[in-house]
Amino acid sequence: MKGRTERVVNKEQPLIDDIRLLGQILGDIVREQEGEDAFELIEAIRKLSVAISLEQSQPAAETLDMLLRSLPSDRAVSVCRAFTYFSHLANIAEDRHHIRRREAHDIAGDRPQDGSLERCFSRLSEKGIMPEAAVTMLADAWLSPVLTAHPTEVQRKSILDSERSIAELLARRGSLRTERDRAQNLKSLKARVSQLWQTRLLRLSKLSVEDEIDNALSAYIAEQQRNQELAAGVAASKDAYQLATLRYRHGLTNFLVALDAERTLLQAERAYSDSNTLIATQLVALYKALGGWNE
């Protein structure tokens, strides 16, 4: 049991490290831009919340309740913003970790992951359910999608751009080898998180039709440009992988170099595939912004 627990902790450690890094950056920015008092207040609330969550501490719950009730409006806004932005940053780290774990499964050649269509088909096959039976069942099934609108979902282009940049910078950290590159990456992360903190989550004015079209078009064009860069990265990774494999077969390099090249290729292909999916989604959003699918 101990060995399994250690493996789980080790598997989740990159996620813990990413969340801790982004949290520290956000904390430094709050201290710089809102002041030491604001930072200490947010830290006190965080620590009390942790005590309530992990220890079910009643004294902590009572202290937190009194503290929150005593907050003036301006302080309450700062606290809400800090925890909201931290949640956004944690979500970015979690998304990155899902990609990281999926790449690890692909490289290890593991069975399809639970929740995937591939695993679903594999289970049907294991149970001896023939494709014809599944087709017949689906033909008679009643499928009713449930669509929900999240009232706090971020739609502002400035927020989306900042969070997209933070995600890309976070993804690059794993491949940086020199302290200089990592320091520059950290500097860029701080700049983007600072930009995020200085941007309102919600618009104070109603979004116009022109704004919706501009946001959708901007996101679509930006992802197309990124997609072209990713395609070039896939081509370069393929060349590097083929060269590394050839050198390994002729005894000119070790197996780890070839394995690292294969890992890089898989990561590049996965990112390119995800980008293609995102382009399709953004094209639908652009079509809707232009007035498509009105009933």
Image (cartoon, rainbow, N blue to C red):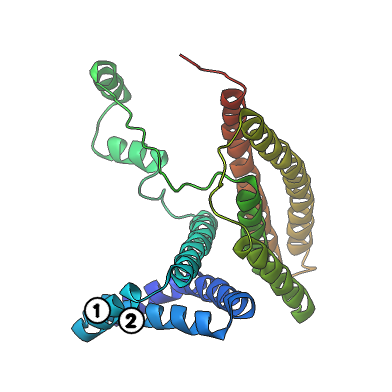
In the rendered view, tell whether residue 78 sits above or below residue 161: below
Q: Which quadrant would residue 217 be assigned to in this image?
A: top right
User: In the displayed structure, does residue 118 sit left or right of residue 78?
Assistant: left
Q: Which quadrant would residue 50 be assigned to in this image?
A: bottom left
The answer to the question of whether label 1 and label 2 lie on touching residues, with beta carbons closer than 8 A, is: yes
User: In the displayed structure, does residue 160 sit left or right of residue 60?
Assistant: right
In the rendered view, tell whether residue 235 sits above or below residue 241: above
Q: Kindly identify which numbered label has been placed on residue 207.
A: none
As rendered, which of 237 and 177 lies closer to the eye?
177
Q: Is residue 23 visible?
A: yes
Q: In the image, what residue occupies the spot 47% across and 62% down?
A: 84
User: In the displayed structure, does residue 14 sit left or right of residue 187?
Assistant: left
Q: Secondary structure at mark 2?
A: helix
Query: Could you say where residue 185 lies in the image, as x and y percent from the top left?
Result: 72, 70
Q: Kindly identify which numbered label has been placed on residue 61.
A: 1
Mark 1–mark 2 distance (CA, rounded to whole Å): 7 Å
As rendered, which of 149 and 222 lies closer to the eye?
149
Q: Secondary structure at mark 1?
A: helix
* Mark 2, other Cα within 10 Å: few <14 / some 14–19 / many ≥20: some
Q: Is residue 1 visible?
A: no
Q: In the image, what residue occupies the spot 66% across and 30% down?
A: 210
Q: Which quadrant would residue 54 be assigned to in this image?
A: bottom left
Q: Amino acid at mark 1?
A: Ala
* Mark 1, other Cα within 10 Å: few <14 / some 14–19 / many ≥20: some
Query: Could you say where residue 231 lies in the image, as x and y percent from the top left?
Result: 74, 43
Q: Which residue, as the protein is rendered here, is positioned at the far top?
A: 295
Pick the quarter of the image with the C terminus.
Answer: top left
Label 2 sits on residue: 48
Q: In the image, what residue occupies the spot 33% across and 29% down?
A: 145
